[in-house]
Amino acid sequence: MKNRLKVLRAERDWTQARLADELEVSRQTINAIEKGKFDPSLPLAFKAARLFGLAIEEIFQDEPQP
């Protein structure tokens, strides 16, 4: 799953640790999501959307399977 977390975080000049604190997850979780190694749970995706004031689809995009 592609996402814009890193870009949105950078626009606010937030570290991964700051975003992790805001979303109540570990910094490692944020790192894994940003690198596409981990897909967030639906509640976490909603929380991120609320935090950034965006729709989930504006942050996370499903990648078509080959």
Image (spheres, rainbow, N blue to C red):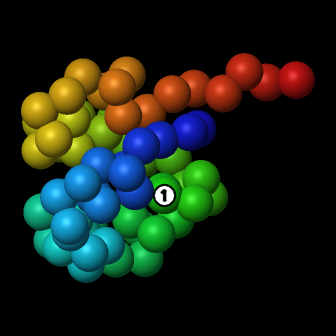
- Against 66, is 18 above or below? below
What's the residue at 31%, 73% (across, down)?
16
Which quadrant does the C terminus fall into?
A: top right
Question: Please, what is the three-letter code of the amino acid marked with disc 1?
Answer: Glu
Instruction: Tell me, yes or no, if residue 56 can be seen here.
Output: yes
> Left or right: 66 with respect to 6?
right
- Against 43, is 15 above or below? below
Q: Return the residue at label 1.
A: 34
Q: Quadrant of residue 25?
A: bottom left
Name the residue nearer the viewer: 26 or 61: 61
Mark 1, secondary structure of its residue: helix
What's the residue at 72%, 21% (across, down)?
64
x, y percentage for residue 53? Answer: 11, 32
Instruction: Tell me, yes or no, if residue 24 can be seen here.
Output: no
x, y percentage for residue 41? Answer: 38, 43
| Classed neighbour count for the residue bearing mark 1: other residues with Cα under 10 Å, few (<14), some (14–19), many (≥20) | some
> Left or right: 1 with respect to 26?
right
Q: Count how many numbered circles sit on residues in the image.
A: 1
x, y percentage for residue 39? Answer: 51, 47
What's the residue at 51%, 28% (across, down)?
61
x, y percentage for residue 19? Answer: 22, 65
